[in-house]
């Protein structure tokens, strides 16, 4: 909902800076207090895949998009070292397979997924030599609604195990680390070259730092709505996720890009460059959903 009592200041063109952020628990620490830090901005919350489409269409100025989508356009730039990554089990990205991974012929992909969809295809092909026929698992549908040999779930709904018994269950963060020895980056803050974001890049890092300081409060606030207890939410945010794009994460990102390019899931160009960050003062932000924007 739009808070009409807090109208955002405008940029020089008379338009608010449009920031797209993921609506999942894994991204809450990245936008904590952003309304107090960012001027001239409108925050839009949606699925990672839809944010990527919005940025590509020019409907967003900066967005937390799937890392594989950051490879899609040579004009894209990474504007913050705030990210969603993992250095082991991630809990919220799971493959449920009814057959041995080498026997998967059909694969249903979570509608919200782009990076995880590419990652699971890479793993199945490069490790087991299979390229299954793909279908989409819509939001609101569960694993039991799909007849595919294997189903990929991401985000909050992946944290609730289905009742069905499976031959194989992969935590993709854990599988990637075991396979490569590197962290995996699921999402990054990206913009298009030449976009004037003002203080936004610096504010994104400030918000991340605040979110990590306030992680216990975030876990308390968000847990009940997800049907998990506070300790589970806290452990997920502090033990399973990493929110800083450090050298190990960059190495993992480079390897993922190379593997994705080999499979035709990303262009061969190098990964986006980092934009220098300039600190500046802050002012209010309004919050909407994508449907309201």
Image (cartoon, helix red, strand yellow):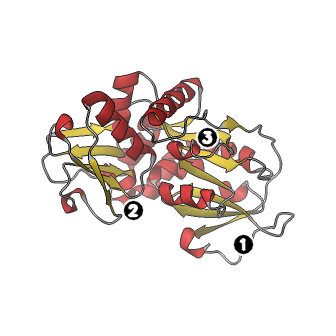
Q: Which mark is residue 225?
A: 2
Q: Are marks 1 and 3 in contact (CB under 8 Å)?
A: no
Residue corresponding to mark 3: 82
- Write the residue at 45% across / 24% down: 182
Say which residue appears at 55% left-offset and 59% top-offset: 53
User: What separation in Å lies between label 2 and label 3 (alpha carbons)?
Assistant: 25 Å
First in sequence: mark 1 vs mark 3: 1
Give the foreground label among 1 and 3.
Answer: 3
10 Å crowding of disc 3: few (<14), some (14-19), many (20+): many
User: Against 260, is 197 above or below?
Assistant: below
Q: Secondary structure at mark 2?
A: helix
From mark 1 to mark 3, how far is it between C-alphas? 26 Å
Q: Is residue 142 left or right of residue 215?
A: left
| Residue linked to disc 1 | 6
- SS of the residue at dot 1? loop
The answer to whether residue 89 is visible is no
């Amino acid at each position: 909902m739009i808070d009409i009592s807090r109208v955002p200041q405008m940029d020089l063109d008379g338009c608010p800076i449009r920031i797209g952020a993921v609506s999942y628990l894994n991204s809450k620490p990245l936008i904590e207090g952003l309304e107090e830090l960012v001027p001239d901005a409108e925050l839009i919350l949606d699925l990672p895949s839809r944010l990527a489409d919005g940025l590509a269409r020019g409907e967003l100025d900066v967005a937390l998009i799937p890392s594989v989508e950051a490879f899609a356009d040579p004009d894209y730039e990474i504007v913050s070292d705030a990210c969603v990554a993992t250095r082991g089990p991630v809990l919220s990205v799971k493959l449920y397979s009814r057959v041995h991974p080498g026997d998967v012929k059909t694969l249903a992909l979570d509608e919200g997924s782009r990076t995880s969809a590419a990652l699971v295809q890479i793993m199945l092909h490069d490790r087991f030599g299979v390229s299954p026929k793909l279908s989409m698992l819509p939001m609101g549908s569960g694993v039991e609604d799909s007849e595919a040999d294997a189903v990929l779930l991401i985000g909050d709904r992946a944290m609730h195990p289905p009742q069905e018994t499976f031959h194989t269950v992969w935590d993709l963060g854990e599988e990637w680390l075991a396979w490569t020895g590197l962290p995996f980056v699921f999402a990054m803050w990206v913009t298009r070259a030449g976009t004037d974001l003002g203080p936004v890049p610096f504010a994104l890092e400030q918000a991340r730092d605040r979110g990590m300081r306030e992680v216990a409060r975030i876990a308390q606030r968000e847990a009940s709505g997800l049907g998990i207890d506070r300790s589970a939410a806290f452990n997920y945010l502090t033990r399973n996720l990493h929110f800083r794009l450090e050298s190990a994460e960059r190495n993992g990102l480079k390897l993922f890009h190379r593997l994705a390019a080999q499979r035709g899931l990303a262009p061969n160009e190098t990964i986006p460059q980092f934009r220098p960050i300039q600190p500046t003062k802050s002012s209010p932000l309004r919050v909407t959903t994508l449907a309201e924007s």
